[in-house]
Amino acid sequence: MTTPTELPDLKLLQLFDLLYDTRSVTRVAEQLGQSQPTVSIWLARLREHLHDPLFIRTPAGMAPTPQADALIGPCREILESLRRFSAWEIAFDPATAQRRFRICMTDASHVTLLPRLLAHVRAQAPGVRLEAARIDGNTERALESGEADLAIGYVPWLSGGIYQQQLYEQDWVCLANRHHPRIRKRLSVKAYRSEGHVAITAGTGTALLEQALVRERIERQIALELPGFLGLGAIVQTTDLITTLPRHIGETLAQASDLAVHACPIPVDGFAVRQHWHARYHHEAGNRWLRSVVARLFGAAGNRLEG
């Protein structure tokens, strides 16, 4: 005997619902993909659970008892609630949403990505506020806790539990004054060694450049070190200094400050810019919307999700 606190299996509720409509054990077995003896066993179990025969065999089929008539409504309410539960998701409507998204990114992305992303969000989701945060040693914990929604950039140290999607590849370029007195059409290795440089000390890809300089046994003549890209365009525009940086930020600064873009004369390993998010928020509707916006704006077609 079952106790009053025990609940019938879902399959028994489905059996009850179908049998009430079809009045046929054979047809119920077909719809459930089960054998007729199995369905008969399930019906016996349901009868025992509810202490009622529920259906009586008649020439017209399996006729429900008064207890079955009384229970069919609650049974169908339970099944509908379970269907809603399995399909449940908090909807995210960008047109009406009131929400803040925090995105970890480098200051290069403030220049190259953020203006376009902000313009799109303001047009499609006027109640959404964006907040830019740094990429640092706290980024992984911030993604896990929900303090940050995304991290966009080259972040190779992020570990388990983080999903990632590649957006685009980066190689390296050099910027120089368009009227540089000694550099014309091409920047040679000799000129790279002898000219003064502005060195950017921050940025997640800086280590790749430093490794290349060591590998090529080049020691730059550094005249100025900057912690980021703020002011870099104006400095190169008004001096004869050169600088080495990833192509995306390089071409953006060159266009804004009328600078010359040169191929980097030494081989430097490229890298991929990706968006990253924690597995806890993989199915969260707002996070999914934001990721889809970033992928559409900055991703190449066919880029795959990476776990």
Image (cartoon, rainbow, N blue to C red):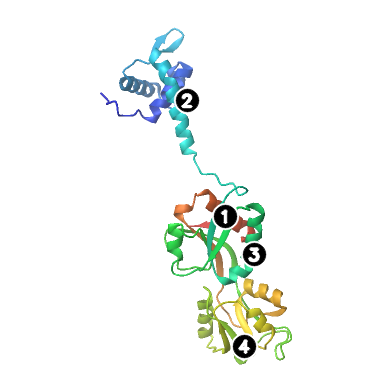
Q: Is residue 2 above or below residue 57?
A: below
Picture quarter containing residue 111? bottom right
Q: Please name the amino acid that badge 3 sits on.
A: Pro
Q: Name the residue under label 2.
A: 31
Q: Nearer the viewer, mark 3 or mark 1?
A: 3
Q: Name the residue under label 1.
A: 290
Q: Nearer the viewer, mark 2 or mark 3?
A: 3
Q: Which of marks 2 and 3 is nearer the N terminus?
A: 2
Q: Is residue 64 above or below residue 14?
A: above
Which dot marks residue 102? none
Could you tell me residue 166's position as x and y percent? 56, 62
Choose between 76 and 220: the one closer to the eye: 76
Q: Please name the amino acid that badge 2 sits on.
A: Gln
Give the crowd class for mark 2: few <14, some 14-19, many >=20 residues within 10 Å. Answer: few
Residue at 42% x, 18% y is: 25
Instruction: Provide the secondary structure element on which disc 3 rests.
Output: helix
Task: Give the alpha-carbon distance from disc 4 to disc 3, as whole Å.
Answer: 32 Å
- Left or right: 247 as drawn, with respect to 6: right
Is disc 4 in contact with disc 3, using a CB cutoff of under 8 Å? no
Task: Give the alpha-carbon distance from disc 2 to disc 4, as whole Å.
Answer: 76 Å
Could you tell me residue 268's position as x and y percent? 56, 78
Q: Nearer the viewer, mark 2 or mark 4?
A: 4
Instruction: Provide the secondary structure element on which disc 4 rests.
Output: helix
Could you tell me residue 147's position as x and y percent? 46, 59
Residue reaching furthest to the left: 1
Q: Name the residue under label 4.
A: 192
Which dot marks residue 115? 3
Task: Give the alpha-carbon distance from disc 4 to disc 1, as whole Å.
Answer: 41 Å
Instruction: Provide the secondary structure element on which disc 1 rests.
Output: helix
